[in-house]
Image: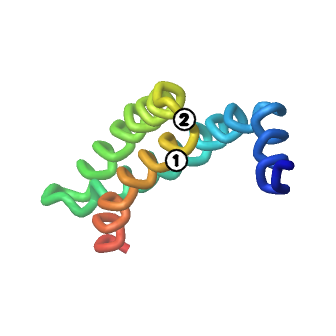
Amino acid sequence: MTSVAGRVRAAFDAWGGPLVSRIAAALFGGYALAALASVAVLALPMSAPQAVLTGEMASFIIYAAAVIWVFAVRSALRAWAGLLVVAAPLLLAAWSVW
């Protein structure tokens, strides 16, 4: 007999759960990563207007790279883990600005 957790996981996999998780990671995780990066740029030693423009332009590249990353890795768990690993140092840098 399979356990309840095994049946829930099988149902999750059968109904496209990993794909939904990757889409959520791409949309929300990529946005969070881009937003953190755009704020973290303000911690760099440059003038505030230049840092705002740099952060704004870099956020587009970071968001696109996050979406590509999420669908390029082997599993949805690795996609979320990768986003969290990259977000941790950005959060520390952004925290100094807030």
Residue drawn at the location 39% of the way across and 37% of the way down: 62
| Image spot of residue 84 (x, y percent) | 44, 54
Mark positioned earlier in the residue sequence (1 or 2)? 2
Residue 52: image location, x then y, percent = 33, 51
Judge from the rendering whether residue 24 lies leftward or rightward of residue 8; answer left or right.
left
> In the structure shown, which secondary structural element does the residue marked by tag 1 occupy?
helix
Q: Residue at x 36, y 50 (%)?
A: 86
Image mark for residue 80: 1
**Can you say whether 92 is above or below 37 in the image?**
below
The residue sitting at 84% across, 40% down in the picture is: 11
Q: In the image, what residue occupies the spot 84% across and 56% down?
A: 4
68 vs 57, nearest the viewer? 68
- Front residue of 83 and 73: 73
As drawn, 36 above or below 17: below
- In the rendering, at what x and y percent does residue 49 appear? 27, 52
**Residue 48 versus residue 23: which sits nearer the camera?**
23
Mark 1 to mark 2 CA distance (whole Å): 9 Å
Q: Secondary structure at mark 2?
A: loop
Q: Write down the residue under mark 2.
A: 75
- Which residue type does callout 1 highlight? Trp
**Mark 2: few/some/many CA within 10 Å (<14, 14-19, 20+):** some
Q: Is residue 14 left or right of residue 87?
A: right
